[in-house]
Image: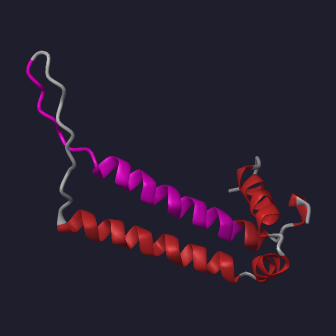
Amino acid sequence: MPTAELPADLVALQAAFQDADAAVAAYVEATDHAPVDAPADGQEPAPSRKVWSDEESDELERLRALRMAALKALWGHPVVTAAMAGGTWKDLHIQLKKAVSAPGWA
């Protein structure tokens, strides 16, 4: 199926999933930075990992749930179901990503 023939609702579902996935990654990146004390001269900094607060963990779980809902909606679309059953999901997925990144898609 050429990109121009993809159903608009399917492209919208792909865009929603990509946005939700990016939101999870951005939140983790923004939250998972622990301040590191400067090491003494000649010493390597010790690796550190931030301990997330309950609020941060809850927000991450909320974002993950949105991502999962978007993925389930995408996978439930009849065109995706047919592509998975017919073995053409990989090609469809590539077309969807191109369609979402095409100029004019919002």
Q: Which residue lies furthest to the left in this view?
A: 40
* Span shown in magenta: 12-40
Residue 51, by quadrant, is bottom left
The structure's colour scheme is secondary structure
Up/down of 72 relative to 55, above or below: below
Q: Where is residue 34 in the image (x, y as percent from the top left)?
A: 20, 44
Q: Main secondary structure of the magenta part?
A: helix
Q: Where is residue 92 in the image (x, y as percent from the top left)?
A: 80, 65
Which quadrant is home to the C terminus?
bottom right
Q: Which residue lies furthest to the front in this view?
A: 43
Q: Which residue is drawn at 50% across and 70% down?
A: 67
Q: Which residue is drawn at 59% across and 74% down?
A: 71
Q: Residue at x 29, y 51 (%)?
A: 31
Residue placed most toward the observer, 79 or 8: 79
In the drawing, does residue 97 fall left or right of residue 66?
Answer: right
Which quadrant is home to the N terminus?
bottom right
Residue 19, by quadrant, is bottom right
Asked whether 51 falls inside the magenta stretch, the response is no
Residue placed most toward the observer, 35 or 48: 48
Residue 46, by quadrant, is top left
Q: Where is residue 35 in the image (x, y as percent from the top left)?
A: 17, 39
In the drawing, does residue 60 fall left or right of residue 85?
Answer: left
Asked whether 13 falls inside the magenta stretch, the response is yes
Q: Position of residue 93 (x, y in %)?
A: 75, 63
Up/down of 82 relative to 11, above or below: below
